[in-house]
Structures are given as C-alpha cells and as structure tokens.
Amino acid sequence: MIDIDFSVFTFLYVSSGMAVILGLWFYYDRRDVSLYERIRVRHTFHCIQCGTLYSERGAREVSRCPHCGFENAKLKF
Ligand SMILES: [Zn+2]
C-alpha cells in the first residue's frame, strides 16, 4: 500500500479535478470554433450594377447579387 500524506492526496485530488475541467473547457471551445465559425462569419457586399447592399455567410470573396445576379467582391473596411 502506498503511504501518502493527506495534504498531498488532497492536492492531487483537486489538481486532477481542475485538469479535467480545463481539458473539457478547451475541447468544447475548440469544437465550437470549428463548428460555428462558418455560420458566424458574414461578409457585406455592394452590387456595383444595381446598388444593393446584401450580406452572405461564409468565407467567400465573391458573391452573386440576389437582385440582378451580378458577381461582386466583398467590401473591405
Ligand atoms: Zn445587383
């Protein structure tokens, strides 16, 4: 049987619990970033043919205007 002091046992018990919580926090944070990044990102486009402002989800550089069908580049600020 392994003899360890009560304070060492308490420290290891609390440390392992905190390590599990931090590991789960890191895992779910990375998972959310990878899953929802495409949904969160919106780009604004300005149609140079009809003047319509519209937005699209996802990381795209060129989008087709919903009114006239002209392809426009995203606005850069
Ligand atoms: Zn247009």
Image: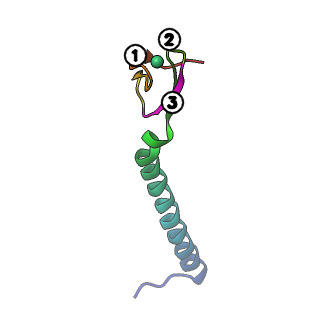
Q: Amino acid at mark 2?
A: Ile
For the magenta stretch, what is the residue range?
52-58
- Viewed as shown, does residue 23 lie left or right of 53? left
Query: Which residue is disc 1 drawn over?
Result: 70
Q: Amino acid at mark 1?
A: Phe
Residue plotted at (60% across, 18% down):
77
Magenta portion: prevailing SS class? strand
Q: Give how far across and how far down residue 35 sits, in percent.
A: 41, 48
Of the residues tagged 2 and 3, which is closer to the observer? 2
Query: Which residue is disc 3 drawn over?
Result: 55
Respond yes or no on whether mark 1 lies under 8 Å from ligand 1: yes
Alpha carbon of mark 3 to alpha carbon of mark 1: how far? 14 Å
Query: Which residue is disc 2 drawn over?
Result: 48
SS label for mark 1? loop
Residue plotted at (52% across, 65% down):
21
Alpha carbon of mark 2 to alpha carbon of mark 1: how far? 8 Å
Q: Is residue 77 magenta?
A: no
